Image: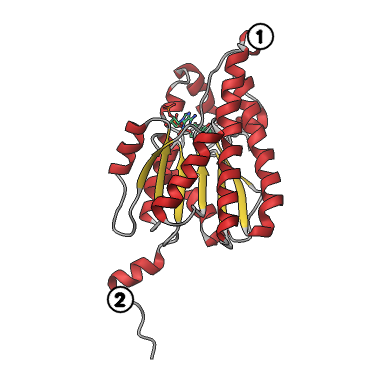
Amino acid sequence: MATGLAGAEAVAAALRLRSRLALVTGGGSGIGRAVCQRFAKEGAAVAVVDIDEGAATETLRTLHRDHQQHSVFVADVTSSESVRSLVSQIQSQFSRPPCVAVNCAGITMDSLLLKMQEEAFDRVLQVNLKGTFLVTQAVATALIASGAKKGSIINLASIVGKVGNLGQANYTASKAGVVALTKTSAKELARYGIRCNTILPGFIDTPMAAKVPQKVLDTVLRLVPMGRLGDPSEVADVCVFLASDDSSYVTGASLEVTGGLFM
Ligand code: NAP
């Protein structure tokens, strides 16, 4: 006769990220914070990574602790030295490399193409695209060296990387680059069991979206079939899917989380 699992055991068995270690960049704000919170509830240990220690510590304070311990790490994703040191600190603290990495660190520095300063172009490419490359490379290297047989890398691009957007030559180029980088990573890393996927959010209610002028947001909202901004938790839900075995045959994909915008 089947006895079934009782109480806490049954809950633990149902957790989709049980025993996984996840690194989340941009973990101090917006989508990154929501991903940390959701991953912790799903049983993952979370390395909350941000350039802003105070913000990352605030995220840490909100994390569910029944299943795993979590930690804050300060890193600048534009610096290879900082990213290498980040991965080695995580490995020494948790005695293993992260098998899930979510690249949420990102910035905007908007202006029309004809007025855009070279520095604004370079800086946005450095954080959004180079940062994603450096973290992908460092995590994949550590995972392969550890002999782990599977991993999941999730990169935050944007729907505007597909369709362009006024005032965002730098940002849209960086996000189109993230999609191409992810597809190449997926092709190269599949043999090591590492899946790489991109999420293309539309307009999500975070501090980044709060910088968009209300007039522009109102225009965008008229174009969103679902008629509202997304909530960061709705992007985090898709991250859980991509981080878990529920997506075991999904790699190189770009998932749109847009409420139907620009479909
Ligand atoms: P957010 O609230 O501004 O959070 C981004 C986080 O990344 C901030 O904590 C930021 O710290 C951190 N960060 C910036 N530069 C960094 C660096 N060099 N190293 C490490 N961390 C750094 O943004 P979000 O809205 O959650 O966006 C998360 C990701 O989703 C981004 O890649 C964004 O492009 C993408 N996305 C967002 C939307 C949206 O509507 N919100 C739409 C499409 C795509 P500071 O605050 O100190 O700079």
Q: Amino acid at mark 2?
A: Ala
Residue that mark 1 sits on: 114
The secondary structure type at the circle numbered 2 is loop
Q: Tell me where residue 19 sits by quadrant.
A: bottom left
Q: How many marks?
A: 2
Of residues 65 and 140, the one drawn nearer to the viewer in this rendering: 140
- Marks 1/2: CA distance? 64 Å
Q: Tell me where residue 61 sits by quadrant.
A: top left
For the residue with label 1, is its CB less than 8 Å from the closest atom of ligand 1? Answer: no
Q: Is residue 73 visible?
A: yes
Residue 186, how many percent across, how many down? 67, 50
Mark seen at residue 6: 2
Residue 155, how many percent across, how many down? 57, 42
Q: Amino acid at mark 1?
A: Leu
Residue 109, how many percent across, how many down? 53, 19
State the residue at coordinates (55%, 59%): 146
State the residue at coordinates (30%, 52%): 64
Relative to 181, is 169 above or below? above
Relative to 240, is 33 above or below? above
Question: Quick check: 9 left or right of 81?
Answer: left
Residue 65, how many percent across, how many down? 29, 54
Q: Tell me where residue 33 sits by quadrant.
A: top left
Quadrant location of the N terminus? bottom left
Quadrant location of the C terminus? top right
The secondary structure type at the circle numbered 1 is helix
Question: Quick check: 213 left or right of 184?
Answer: left
Q: Is residue 166 visible?
A: no
Is the residue marked by circle 2 packed among few (<14), some (14-19), or many (20+) residues within 10 Å?
few
Of residues 195 and 221, the one drawn nearer to the viewer in this rendering: 195
